[in-house]
Image: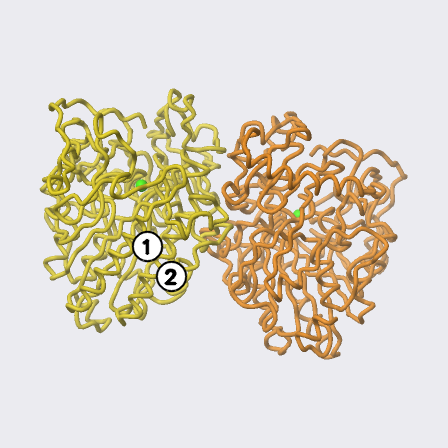
Chain colours: A orange, B yellow
Amino acid sequence: AAKLGAVGLPQPPNIVLMLMDDMGWGDLGVNGEPSRETPNLDRMAAEGMLFPSFYSANPLCSPSRAALLTGRLPIRNGFYTTNAHARNGYTPQDMVGGIPASERLLPQLLKEASYATKIVGKWHLGHQPLFHPLKHGFDEWFGSPNCHFGPYDNKAKPNIPVFRDWEMVGRFYEEFPINLKTGEANLTQIYLQEALDFIKRQQSQQRPFFLYWAIDATHAPVYASRPFLGTSRRGRYGDAVREVDDSVGQILQLLRGLHIAESTFVFFTSDNGAALVSAPQQAGSNGPFLCGKQTTFEGGVREPAIAWWPGHVPMGQVSHQVGSLMDLFTTSLSLAGLQPPGDREIDGLDLVPVLLQGQLIDRPIFHYRGNELMAATVGQYKAHFWTWTNSWEEFKKGINFCPGQNVSGVTTHTQQEHTSLPLLFHLGRDPGERYPLRFDSAEYEAALQRISPAVQQHQDGLVPGQPQLNVCNPAVMNWAPPGCERLGKCLPVPESAPEKCSWPH
Amino acid sequence: AAKLGAVGLPQPPNIVLMLMDDMGWGDLGVNGEPSRETPNLDRMAAEGMLFPSFYSANPLCSPSRAALLTGRLPIRNGFYTTNAHARNGYTPQDMVGGIPASERLLPQLLKEASYATKIVGKWHLGHQPLFHPLKHGFDEWFGSPNCHFGPYDNKAKPNIPVFRDWEMVGRFYEEFPINLKTGEANLTQIYLQEALDFIKRQQSQQRPFFLYWAIDATHAPVYASRPFLGTSRRGRYGDAVREVDDSVGQILQLLRGLHIAESTFVFFTSDNGAALVSAPQQAGSNGPFLCGKQTTFEGGVREPAIAWWPGHVPMGQVSHQVGSLMDLFTTSLSLAGLQPPGDREIDGLDLVPVLLQGQLIDRPIFHYRGNELMAATVGQYKAHFWTWTNSWEEFKKGINFCPGQNVSGVTTHTQQEHTSLPLLFHLGRDPGERYPLRFDSAEYEAALQRISPAVQQHQDGLVPGQPQLNVCNPAVMNWAPPGCERLGKCLPVPESAPEKCSWPH
Ligand SMILES: [Ca+2]
Ligand SMILES: [Ca+2]
């Protein structure tokens, strides 16, 4: 709160977190995408602070989002599985688990400082009624509990519902069409309108607001609305990016137009790296980095990241702060004059000194995959304790998380343990993780002596949360969510048949 | 000349071509280098026009430079070898050949418009007296005829001389030290001073000038002066880039300070892709592109490129013109009000309409390696007629042009012919050349129908020049170049022993 006094605001700033889905580090013009189709994001960076070393908390949607909203690693908040070692779990529509009631989410906490809170887009923290975002601190929701996969037959599986607040207002591929053949869908326009409307409403009520804008056009199946389809040099994925970029521009322009740009902190990032497994039509770019979504190589976890707060965050800055999605939790609380909960471990840092004074805070980043600490980054050094892309079985089916890339002993298809002699990379000289440091070098020794105690300390204090992603059950799918009766879209609920979820990756 | 009238200059603009050595597309902050250490180049791009799709004329130094200065492909100007199919040749110090007297070089032609001309840095178009840059249109030279490899023992091979104009003024590793252990050398500072001095002198004489600033700090062995050593997040290569960037900033600042920024056209680019074979300590980054120097994949031939001409080239533009190093020949002539020679094929385009009016000109790019047309680009499509990285023999020795990268059937270690069914890539969706189009797709058919006639036309009209890079002879090395007597540094010239040059790559 002292910090806020210093920036001279009558009340805490509004907070807008723009979280993209599977967008890659290399998808932004400002990060070197050759077709340069993100003028609004590039302008946002030019007006704000770019973070080239900003990390997701997990290489997959659900755990990453749970970490963002709790400020805690998935291993703590339960967004992992013990069904198989080092495998990624998420919340498909038959997932029984979700965000535990014991977790305290960012919107819940912000309400203590009188914020109006809204989520637009993908929730992905569980879809059973107890996990509903309005039970976890959001005042409003427009969006879906799961990914927009489909269409389903509404027999073996229902189509994914779209909610307005407590009730379903339709389903993907039905009331909210996505044309898989042409890639046409109006969803980004709808999500944009939801954002603009919310901002205008709150502004007129003079309340600080928190908007979590979690749109998903860049997650396969990628989509764009008709005015954007076919306009990109990059194909359909690029069309989606262009529409996202245009929408970001419209939101920032509204903030300027309402004269609340200087009282609104905006952060743009993504939940995990580009899903190269869906390339080239349905995936983005991780720039010079290794592999993609699902992996703990840089391509899976390094994210595009821009902070924007005119008059406060200085213009045109690049911060080499090693940042994390979880920092947005702690930073948002700090901006609101709040402390993070004191009764639990919080992994997110308060980046306010980084944003306002250009400070650099030394801190480790822990890269988990499922229940295993795969890697850790300290400064410019990254240590891999385990390497794995996917299994030979999956790889032989054509599922490739590192297409065109192959680093011997690194992009392995068996789970290789290196805990006694980690593979170390210097991410400045070798951002592509191609050249492990020599084990017998002084540099290796020195780097490991910096990393090892940080890892030891982390692991000593770690109390894993109850794993949420172990049990699946067709009965928990959204056959008949609230609101279905009014729409006449209730489907019969099958018998309960809980089983262990299967996680191939 | 009409165009110049249109921009209202009393005389043709000064021309500064800044040609880097082995710098990669991905080495610029503006192209997404994560450490973001090129503030001056990034500012140059923000004040000028960035070309994300600008190509070298060859993936190796000498042929690329010969093409730049003649506006002609190496296959025409003789900078290739017939000693072995599709292998790269250059001008090491025992090379007999060089730039043919019949070629008309950019500085020769610019002298017709009264330009004062200077080359600073690496010439690399032959080092026998008849190839001397002052015999090919340059008024002044400070630099070396060959790469700064060494040190040599002055017995089997002499150290490479450094020339001022007609005479040697010392040798690398002797009067011009390069510390291979620490990476320290003052050469970039010397080359910078040469540039600044030349600009100031010409300005005071009110003559238009042409400065070809061909510095080589980013070619292995990479070097930097003491103030820059150890300052980069990227290691020694990054130190070199930082010094280059600082020097570019100083040159542009001098132009502003002398009030001739608006009458000076500056273009920054590189001669070939980053030499990944020397990574990670001695090589840069090709960003998201495939492989590096020596290859005709994008990493070997796509270059960083920025045009800067305040008041004429509009600020902050990105041009998707498919450009070539050879265009700088034709464009420079156009800026000087001159026509390219009419008695020979010129491959370079006049980019003035691109620069001043934002036009886009449809044109093919032909990617040669030695005597073979390996690939061609038309619009966003690239066809590979031959694929090859290097031989299995070389690869097994640890020489790798595509470290960490492996695209099945593309990054081959045998010379694979695809002339009857070329591999096609869409560089917008797939800039990394990972996903060849399906041969049976309509898109493949349509793209090939665009590329094939362009290739046919090119090959029908092609008259290869006399190959210059076939014969090597230890007697032609710079044992006793002009100026050696004054320095007391003449070495005995061995017997003439011409032999076929060996080109492993
Ligand atoms: Ca995702
Ligand atoms: Ca070169």
User: In front here: B18 or B174?
Assistant: B174
Residue at 64 percent across and 39 percent down: it is A296
Label 1: which secondary element? strand
Residue at 9 percent across and 42 percent down: it is B102
Q: Is residue B461 visible?
A: no
Q: From the viewer's perspective, is residue A258 above or below residue A314?
A: below
B35 lies left or right of A153: left
| Residue B357, x across and y down, in percent | 31, 65
Q: From the viewer's perspective, is residue B403 above or below residue B287?
A: above
Q: Which residue is mark 1?
A: B268
Q: Residue furthest right?
A: A495
Q: From the viewer's perspective, is residue A322 above or below residue A398?
A: below
Characterize the local packing of mark 1: few (<14), some (14-19) or many (20 or more) Cα atoms within 10 angstroms.
many
Quadrant of the image for the N terminus of chain A? bottom right
Q: Which residue is mark 2?
A: B44
Residue at 29 percent across and 53 percent down: it is B18
Tell me which label, 1 or 2, sits earlier in the chain: 2
Q: Chain of mark 1?
A: B
B61 lies left or right of A191: left
Instruction: Choose top left, top right, bottom left or bottom right for residue B76.
Output: top left
